[in-house]
Amino acid sequence: MFTLTINGDAREVDVEEGTPLLFVLRDTLGLTGTKYGCGIAQCGACTVLMDGAATRSCQLPVEAVGDSAITTIEAVETDEVGRRVVAAWIENEVPQCGYCQSGQVMAATALLKDTPDPADDDILYGMSNICRCGTYNAIAAAVRQAAKA
Amino acid sequence: MTTSSHTAAGLSRRTFLAGSGAFVLGAALPARVLAEAAGAGEGAAAMAPAPGTRVAAFIEIGADNAVRFLSPFVEGGQGIATGMAQTVGEELDVDPSRITVDYAPPGPDYLVVNGMRLTGGSFSTRSSFPVVRRLGATARDMMLRAAAARLEVDAASLSTSDGVVTHAATGRTLTYGDLAEEAMALTPREDVALRDPAAFRWIGKPVARIDVADKSRGLAKFTIDQVVDGMLFAAVVHAPYYGTEPLSLANAADVKAMPGVHSVHTLPGAVAVTADSWWRARKAVEALDVTWSDPAPSGIDTVAADFSSAAMRAALAASTAEGVSVEAEGDVDAAFAAAAKTVEAEYDAPYLAHAQLEPPSAIARFNADGTLEVWLPNQMPDAFLKLCAEAGGVAPEKVTLHQPMLGGFFGRHFTYGSGNPFPQAIALAKATGRPVKLVWSREEEFKMDAMRPLSFTRFKAAIGADGMPTAITARTVGEGPLGRYFGAAPDSSMVEGITEKPYAIANRAMESVALPHPVNIAFWRSVGHSMNDGFYESFLDEVAEGGGQDPFALRKALLAQSPRHLALLDEVERISGGWKRGPYTVDGTVRARGVAMASPFGSETATIAEVSIADGATKVHHVWVAFDPGSVVNPAIVKRQVESAVALGLSAVLVEQAVYENGQRRDANYDTYQVLRREMMPAVTVSIVESGAPMGGVGEPGLPGVPGAVVNAVAALTGTRVRSLPLANTALSGA
Ligand code: FES
Ligand code: FES
């Protein structure tokens, strides 16, 4: 049994050690906005914020979360930066299939919290999430817009 | 579907072949659709329940005036839901942003693609545009007539605006929702007028996508996100060699005792565990100690222990089998006999995975009343329904499909036999008596995904004393998905992009040789065009070089009689700032450009790519595409689709390959299966040219020009002509 802080709430979960946070979120807590893409920290679809930093939840064992505050896409708009990122995503019509976009939004939010006025290279190297639909240029445009908003 | 000889795709061969000319060539539309497009009127026969005519099957209007459109096409990122909302909304007179678009269930009403139903072949908009307009207009007419009856006025005195009927003389208004019940009881009229295109408010405009808000908030629900009460989670491990079987389990009891495990199963070509969470099921199934049957020791008839991509490529190249002519014009032998020079080259491209980001999954539930419900991703509902019924041992009318949007597809979600998880989910639901949600891990997906076929073509060209090509021949060896799944022979999906080129080369002899792949093969975005246009356009640059011609000038000369293609070349030249092949220096890097054209899926493209070389690898800086799909419904979505297709084309030409070694796929996940990443993405400029030609496809045509343009740019820069993709397999050095 672990007690996690998810989107501001304390949540008790009955899973064994080694269970990735991703599947605790999706299957135990029903927070399916966070996606499974690869399970090996390659694609970024499972990105959440851990104490504000972008973290790939598929490679984060539940016992490693400790007291850290986890924010998922479901609560990203309660954060001022996250709200701007989502607004920029919608205005720029970034998503195609959308499957990677929860992770992209979380990664962008973390980037802008850390680097409020990112250079192009900050976006290029600060967000390694895969988008198989090739929305990379739209993502970069939305991140720049969110930074200026 | 009327016949019983099912192919692997779950469709009868005869049904397919009836429409195969149109499917293959992507040009013809059903006669009825053409008649409608031409304004010929539907006639009594067409208003019988012919596909695409029954208003109630497509349009639902709630008492609250909410409008729902049941789309024949699945949304998987291409923006088709928005296109449908624009098209039906334009004629129905409802703002597209207020229309909910859902993927319609299987059924005869929705067989609007040449009498079939599929989301693919870049067919969605062009096959349905007149049909959907007419549905919207017919429904609006029913609203007007219902309002006229209610208000006891002449329908001609009424007007509509965004779902409200107004009687101007008295100021009375009724919403469509107020009228829906009465309206839907009326007999649809066959002769409703369509809106004058000059008065379009939404068609042809960059209307905002209706799905981006949910997708930006993590609210979009894909199959993998679905939950059913009381369900078990399942995970599988497939045989290490394709086509081998589990013989025994050494530790089934131990695995059964693992936390949360419900049951352990063997399935055709796989083992499975069900549990109370997916992670537990996965840990358990991966702990199973399985003895598998042995593959054949050697050869390419099956995926043998020594099967490899290299061996398959060698077999295609070594084939001496007689080919079937797929294009013949003029006298090739005479042209070669008279040639001042000849050029010859062999091209190949690898197997490719779809690598859509959503791993495949399915949920199956048998209900107490004998019905079966299945949640699954698909591009072809009727085929899936039939296969679900067979897998579940129930009649098709007892099967309900739930069909969420797709987390990317690119051809992934057709029926590919063991390449789909739903038969396993159904088998496990049956065995356990519980609803079962089966998710394939990424590793199982990369093991079992049906692949874009590895392909091989040998070209020869004759060049005259003036440096112009006089003849071209091509010999393509292999197998394509249209042949495997739909019995097409010769298989146009092998040679599309090599045949039917617009270039004025008088003597041509193209042949194809069937040599089946032992692996599961698939439709992949742009299908045969995904490699063949690149082969052809690269070889055309070799022909230009052989004749001492500039490749851009040679294309212009060969297209002198084709205004549509010349206009595209002019446009791509304009948006790229003028043709220059290079090498030249920009920002301290030496760069060069390549050009390529393609005519895929009824559309036309001209593409220019600019590249440099860094650390032996190709860096693409900019891709310019002039794109002529005839006419467009949503220019913003079209541009994004072209950019998306460019990205996939770049992935294929630069880095991507699914490699077999020693009978197994080498790459199990994205760590080694390379796809286009952010740092590889160039600037992309798309210019849409609306020539007014018949509407072509949009989702795929942006791709086929990219490999040729990039390979040609690399050759211009380095002097190295890379004929085996991806480029990453060849160490390059800058000029
Ligand atoms: S699912 Fe975690 S990075 Fe891909
Ligand atoms: S939008 Fe489809 S994977 Fe990114």
Image (tube, coloured by chain):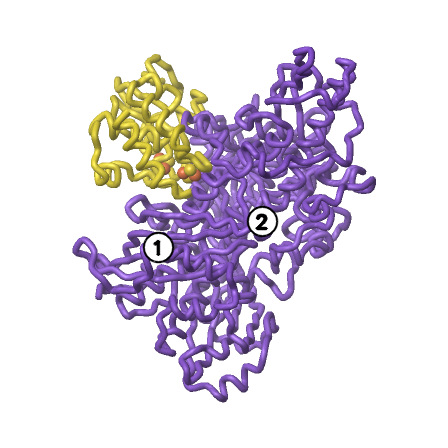
Residue with the mark numbered 1: B655
Q: Give the percent coordinates (x, y) of residue B378.
A: 58, 40
Q: Residue furthest left?
A: B588
Q: Is residue B596 or residue B494 the one in the foreground? A: B596
User: In which quadrant will I find the C terminus of chain B?
Assistant: bottom left
Q: Residue furthest bottom?
A: B337
Q: Is residue B157 or residue B666 the one in the foreground? A: B157
Q: Give the percent coordinates (x, y) of residue B509.
A: 56, 76
Q: Residue furthest front?
A: B169
Q: Is residue B439 left or right of residue A141?
A: right
State the image quarter where residue B553 is shown.
Answer: bottom left
User: Which kind of residue does numbered mark 1 sit on?
Assistant: Val
Q: Is residue B447 left or right of residue A59?
A: right
Residue with the mark numbered 2: B695
Q: Residue at x 47, y 70 (%)?
A: B558
- The picture quadrant for ligand 1 comes to top left
The chain that appears purple in the image is B
Q: Colour of chain A?
A: yellow
Q: Residue at x 62, y 57 (%)?
A: B24
